[in-house]
Amino acid sequence: MQVQQQQQHVQSIRVQQQQQQQQEYQWLQQQLLQREEVERQRRWEVHQQAIQQQVQEREHQEQIEMEQVRQLSQRLLTEALSGRPYTEPVQHHHMGLMNIQCPNCHALHFLSEKLSNSSALHPRFGICCLQGQVVLPPIQQWPRVVQDLFDDPQDQREFRKNVRQYNNALAFTSVGVEVDRHTVQGAGPASFRIHGTLHHLMGALMPPQGLQPSYAQLYIYDPQEATNTRLQRNPDLQGDILLDLHTILREHHPYADVYQQAHAIMQAKPPEQHTDVCMRLYLQQGTDGRRYNLPTVDEIAAIMPGDGSEIVRKDRDIILRLQGGGLRRISNLHPSYLPLHYVLLFPHGQEGWHLDIPLQAAGGGNHRSKKVTQTLWYAYRLHVRPPQVEPANLFKAGRLFQQLICDGWASIEQCNLTWVANNQTKLRAELYRGLQDRLAQDAGQDLGGVGRVILPSTHKGGPRYMNQLLQDSLAICREYKKPDLFLTMTANGSWPEITENLFPGMFRISFSYIIIGSPS
């Protein structure tokens, strides 16, 4: 009995010591958090003071430059009148660092990109988020394996060189497009140029008899077996990298688990139903479009017998077949259009643009539409932000990032053309009147060559758009006489504005966002 009491006493002392240690640890954590908060506030104040000082210095420098430009213009005019040769100015224009944050979305800009009705001390920007009307969740941080592949200086050259091939080998969907190989394989910066429409394709979960599995079918197999199959099609890739990426996607990408369970469910059906059974993957209507909730198996999938044509909404549904059915297009309006193909850019399956993303009212007022358009979505995503706000994953992907931009442009253009094709009765009103006048003049006119879809002058790149530009140019010449100078503006990858704003270890070829998003 005495020994038991002593053991209980010792145990009580140990419990008290543990509680005391836990209290001390919690106190130390609170002290550390308070110090970090004080230090963070101090750094923020120093940063704001530095920005204000930089703005004041820039305003002063702009005044000096304006005076120098005035003096230079006067000198050049004098030299032109006297017949002296022109020489390049000693001081060149410089836009400075791209470190001015948007007050709404924190996108980084040059100061010269600010809205004309905002001041240099309190700049506001509209190209990134429409002054706060576009609110999207930040891009999720890559898993450590993917992050190391893009950041490791030893592996990044080989991996980045073949990053598109790695992505295509691991993607759930394939790209159906005619690529212009003349520019892709030529000298100079890497480019991705296409002809015709760009779309993503998906087949059945089981390959046809006699063929090896590919794309989403490989996520049903063992990781090593899937890697061996990929290496047979891509012998220039590294097997250890493919195996690591397959394991990461199998762990983090929600559709990998969904496809495997869909295969198991449909495989359990009787063999005579394998060619008819299908599964419809859908997203719940109540999902918050701004939060981009990752789908689970219970939320995303439902068994639907038949041929898959019943009650299908292309912008929210994906039809999976066990066998047969050929290749089916994935609608570019579907939220998973991007994460199903660009698995290295969105390894967590974070949803892309869809029709139900709300547009926020600016200051409680009215806005031009109720939903975020594709153009606004891509404009928001193609702006770099500080690392503590959003990781710069997309801008590290090199050629895969370029393909994403090209894919986005093709999707936007396709939606615009679809709208034009579906609204011909509204767009042809004035044209019909012109055709009627022409037929009245010449009743024997052959209209067999007239197209069924007419592009209005508001569609950029169309024949009427180009003709309108020509007519506007001729009108300007009639008003202000013939022009004396014809200027062609180009972008140089060696400009200081580009080289000074690259991330550590990055190449200027990969960072086309600086050239695209900033005026020269």
Image (tube, rainbow, N blue to C red):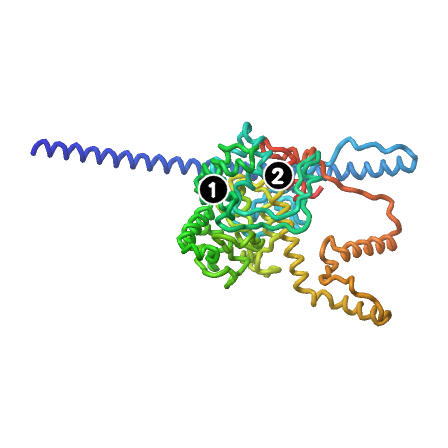
Q: Label 1 crowding class (10 Å Cα cut-off): few <14, some 14-19, many 20+?
A: many
Mark pair 2, 1: CA separation: 20 Å
Q: Position of residue 206 (x, y in %)?
A: 48, 48
Question: With respect to residue 342, does 269 lie above or below?
Answer: below
Q: Position of residue 326 (x, y in %)?
A: 55, 53
Q: Is residue 24 left or right of 451 when viewed as pictured? A: left
Q: Is residue 192 left or right of 298 when viewed as pictured? A: right
User: Which secondary structure, mark 2?
Assistant: helix
- Res. 79 visible in picture: yes
Q: Position of residue 336 (x, y in %)?
A: 52, 51
Residue toward you, 325 or 292? 325
* Residue where numbered disc 1 is placed: 249
- Res. 42 visible in picture: no
Q: Label 2 crowding class (10 Å Cα cut-off): few <14, some 14-19, many 20+?
A: many
The amino acid type found where label 1 is placed reads Leu
Q: Which quarter of the rendering shows the N terminus? A: top left
Ranked by sequence position, the earlier of labels 2 and 1 is 1
The amino acid type found where label 2 is placed reads Arg
Residue toward you, 446 or 116? 446
Task: Give the label on residue 399, or none.
Answer: 2
User: Which secondary structure, mark 1?
Assistant: helix
